[in-house]
Amino acid sequence: MDLVLLGAPGAGKGTQAERLEQWLAIPQVSSGDLFRVNIAEGTALGRAAQSYIDRGALVPDDVTIGMVAERLAEADCADGAILDGFPRTVAQAKALDELLAEMGRQVDLVPYVTVARETLLERLGGRWTCRACGAVYHQVYRPPEVTGVCDVCGGELYQRPDDTAETQARRIDVYMQETSPLIAYYRERGLLVEIDGERSIDEVEAALRAAVSSMERASSYCP
Ligand code: AMP
């Protein structure tokens, strides 16, 4: 099964993708995480992406599509993936359709997690990320047990440079301009399911599970 999680930065896609990963036993593929690993490792791709990420702009499609294509070709993605942060443009969505078609697959469902702009800014402002494993915390909504330390792996928590005040607003604007056309793209294909992301993490998770289960029931129904 291949899922595309849509939603603005701060909508909670990463948190929900982690939970769906456990439940569905298919990996989360986060383009943002892949870029951060490349930057931390100092690869050529990381160097190419860094300046875009630092200013909250989108990394060019060719770089991004190539990186995600390589990830989807890995063995653990053979049964599907939960795409988080990719696609972000219609060109990326078309490239994903082609990539999956080559593997005899398709996008099965696109949950779109909706959250008001003020909530997005509030969430991004308090967000802390584990330097080692990428787990995401929030100082109010999801605090770690020990301040500054990851509950999962004991790694150091830090604020992403692109989670600073100036870049946050820019990332949300970029999302509205460049990523919102994807909503129409997937709605026209009958794949979009809107999920109210203003609710608690558990409630959003339950809504996502219900959407996945109902898609599975519909696709196994052969009259
Ligand atoms: P994220 O962790 O998804 O919020 O992504 C962090 C940053 O990585 C974004 O603000 C972009 O600069 C870059 N990025 C992540 N995914 C993509 C994508 N699909 N296309 C272009 N740039 C991306």
Image: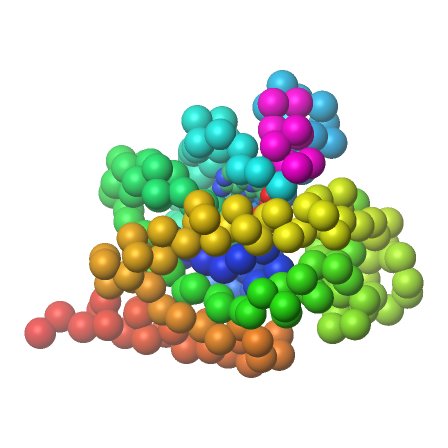
Picture quarter with the C terminus = bottom left
Tell me the residue at 79%/72% (across/down): 140
Residue nearest the observer in this picture, 68 or 72: 68
Task: Tell which quarter ligand 1 is in.
Answer: top right
Does any portion of residue 134 appear in the rendered image? no
Q: Residue at x 35, y 43 (%)?
A: 90
Tell me which residue sits at (72%, 27%) in the image: 41
Query: What residue is shown at x 82% (from left), y 49% (from top)?
Result: 158
Q: Is residue 92 left or right of residue 25?
A: left
Q: Which residues are magenta?
A: 47-55
| Quadrant that contains the N terminus | bottom left
Task: Give the overall secondary structure of the magenta segment.
Answer: helix
Looking at the picture, how far across and down is residue 195, in whole percent?
45, 73
Tell me where residue 142 appears, x and y as whole percent.
75, 70
In the displayed structure image, the side of residue 109 where residue 198 appears, left or right: right
Residue 78 sits in quarter: top left
User: Farthest residue toward the left?
Assistant: 223
x, y percentage for residue 67?
50, 31
